[in-house]
């Protein structure tokens, strides 16, 4: 298995927005933005996303595959933020 790289960016996205997802260097910054947007848009869900892998194919057929290290819990173990309200 190929060595995994650190996550290069985090995205904040929701399905109702017509705007391009905003990218962040730090997970904490993305989470702050998602929380701010969710508070400003009650009932809407904002997701913090990270890439699992990337694929690049060059003219001539050479391929580059990069996989990123995720050290997070599965979605089924999501934390409750009720205490932060």
Image (cartoon, rainbow, N blue to C red):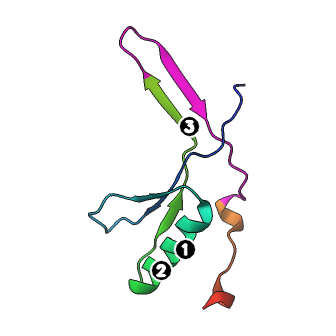
For marks 2 and 3, the one nearer the N-term is 2
| Residue sticking out furthest to the top | 60
Q: Helix or strand or loop: what does disc 2 sit on?
A: helix
SS majority, magenta: loop
| Residue with the mark numbered 1 | 32
Q: Nearer the viewer, residue 77 or 42?
A: 42
| Residue with the mark numbered 2 | 36
Whether residue 23 is situated above or below residue 17 in the rendered picture: above
Residue at x 63% of width, y 40% of height:
68
Residue at x 72% of width, y 66% of height:
77
| Residue with the mark numbered 3 | 53
Whether residue 24 is situated above or below residue 67 in the rendered picture: below
Rendering coords of residue 17 (x, y %): 31, 67
| Residue sticking out furthest to the left | 18
Please report the bounds of the magenta region as a residue range. 57-74
In the rendered image, residue 26 lying in the magenta stretch gets the answer no
Q: What is the count of numbered marks?
A: 3
Q: Is residue 74 visible?
A: yes
Spatial separation of the CA atoms under disc 2 and disc 3: 28 Å
- Pointer 2 local density, CA inside 10 Å: few below 14, some 14–19, many at least 20: few
Q: Quadrant of the C terminus?
A: bottom right
């Amino acid at each position: 298995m190929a060595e995994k790289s650190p996550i290069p960016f985090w995205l904040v996205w929701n399905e109702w927005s017509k705007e391009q997802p905003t990218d962040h260097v730090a997970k904490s910054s993305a989470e702050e933005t998602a929380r701010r947007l969710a508070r400003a848009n009650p009932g809407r869900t904002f997701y913090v996303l990270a890439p699992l892998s990337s694929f690049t194919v060059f003219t001539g057929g050479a391929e580059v595959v990069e996989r990123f290290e995720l050290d997070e819990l599965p979605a089924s173990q999501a934390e409750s933020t009720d205490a932060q309200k």
